[in-house]
Amino acid sequence: MNQPAPFFRGLFEAHLHVSHLEKAMRFYGHVLGLELGHTEPQRRAAFYWIGRGRRSMLGLWEKPPWIVNGTKNMIQTQHIAFGVEFEDLDSAIQRVKQKGIEPRNFFGQITDEPSVLAWMPAASIYFNDIDGHLLEFIAEIKSKPAPDLGIVSLTEWKEAHGA
């Protein structure tokens, strides 16, 4: 098994292509509550700090320079997972629900009950931004992995672990 390079500290930034910068900024700033770090109106870009300590960043680009000319107006949806503490997961879910967003489990069913990826283990809930990007809140569960369980509801996970 390959070991991670010892100089990696984590993922510093990720970028998403958005159809309308100001609408995306309202979503990521007002709905999710991310801290705006910087905007570049001429380049149609905004950068948000994620989490405490400004250790990672999300860039939003209306006209990203990495997209070839013929596809600038086409959004290719992507997936980003935001790490949260397990104790804060329910509050994060309730925040997006209060903003009119439907959270979903791993299987796409509308619910506010997280799915547990038992091989990690971690609890996840999914939702979409205004451009259809799949966003996720994921929280590590302080327990031994149970890969044989696959992907189960948080209730099923707790029942299997006597919690």
Image (cartoon, grey):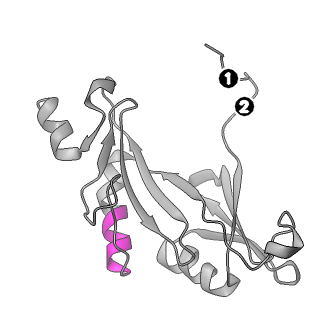
Span colored in magenta:
92-99
Q: Name the one closer to the observer, 47 or 131.
A: 131
Question: Viewed as shown, does residue 156 lie left or right of 77?
Answer: left
Residue in view at x 67 percent, y 23 percent: 4
Residue 149: where, in percent of width, then height? 26, 30
Indicate whether 14 appears above or below 75: above
Question: Viewed as shown, does residue 14 lie left or right of 40?
Answer: left
Residue in view at x 80 percent, y 80 percent: 44
Residue 119: where, in percent of width, then height? 37, 29
Indicate whether 63 appears above or below 68: below
Label 2 sits on a secondary structure element that is loop
Disc 2 designates what residue? Answer: 8
Residue 79: where, in percent of width, then height? 56, 57
Q: Amino acid at mark 2?
A: Phe
* Residues under numbered marks 2 and 1 in contact, where contact means CB atoms less than 8 Å apart: yes
Residue 111 placement: quadrant:
bottom left
Q: Residue furthest top?
A: 1
Q: Residue furthest front?
A: 70
Q: Main secondary structure of the magenta part?
A: helix
Label 1 sits on a secondary structure element that is loop
Residue 145 placement: quadrant:
top left
Q: Can residue 146 be seen at all in this image of the molecule?
A: no
Q: Residues within 10 Å of mark 1 (few under 14, many from 20)?
A: few
Closer to the observer: label 2 or label 1? 1
Residue 121: where, in percent of width, then height? 36, 33
Residue in view at x 40 percent, y 59 percent: 126
> Does the stretch in magenta take in 7?
no
Disc 1 designates what residue? Answer: 4
